[in-house]
Image: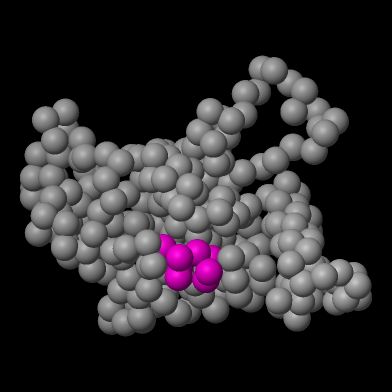
Amino acid sequence: MTKYLEQAGVVGAEDFSGSLPGARRESVLRRRSIAREEALGRRLGLRGWGRRGMHVAMASLSLILAAPLLLLAAIAVKLSSPGPVIYSQERVGLERRRRRGDRRSRDRRTPDRRESNAGGRVFRMHKFRTMRANGNGDAERQVWATKDDPRITPVGRVLRAFRFDELPQMVNVLLGDMNIVGPRPEQPEIFKKLRQELADYPRRQHVLPGITGLAQVNHGYDRCMEDVQRKLTLDLDYIGRSSPAEDLKIMLKTVPVVLFRKGGA
């Protein structure tokens, strides 16, 4: 544990923890790790802005290059079943905790939606609709979709197989809601349930959520709580050593997952 935290950038973790008893040492080191993760969400710094710029540039390029395919996908979705082409759904995003004395924390005109949604800033995530719409013209909400979900349309199944339904989320990257790489954002109601089951689950909100991630390239759709736990472990591992180089590595690993349905497909 100490070695991992040293690699993650917790300065002096080994010297500091050596004088503490086992359980207390683990507790202190865990708090230090969480504090570092929260700092990532509060301030970007030069390296952070460079990394963010890389994601914005790649998202812009992806939308330009994929424009013809996006048009074909939109037509296919529209012809496959009644309902909207683009499906927008609320997801829990980055938790930006304000330090005491922060100007915005004192500004009552800028309410923190994190408090009302208990986890992070809620945003609307966009994707191609892959499921049959209900009577209101919208797909069912707050239901944990699975790979063999009967609500998925034939066109939607193809889009999901190659992760093409996620491409509209490049717009979310440009809007600042997401990065290309990061933990997958969850629906508010499902998030509330998962954080009750897994104490460390809210730590995923210390960085911007992503379209792909370390958990996604190694595991497919969640089928049980054990799957969620495995992905959570990978998400926290990613947060602990996140960097532009790590993001590029995960993007490269995503290519065979999307094109050849290897790894986490």
Residue 67 percent across, percent down from the top left: 33, 57
User: Would residue 228 be found to the left or right of residue 41 on screen?
Assistant: left
Left or right relative to 18: residue 183: left
**64 falls in the magenta region:** no
Is residue 172 shown to the viewer in this render? no
Q: Which of 93 and 165 is in front in this view?
A: 93
Numbered range of the magenta stretch: 228-235
- Residue 237: x and y in percent read 60, 71
Q: In this view, does 99 lie to the left or right of 73?
A: right
Which quarter of the picture shows residue 126? top left
- Horizontal side of 242 relative to 214 (left or right) equals right
In this rendering, the answer to whether 105 lies above or below 10 is: above
* The N terminus: image quadrant: bottom right
Q: Residue 69 is drawn in which quadrant?
A: bottom left
Q: Which colour scheme is used?
A: one colour
Question: Compared to 230, does 252 lie above or below?
Answer: below
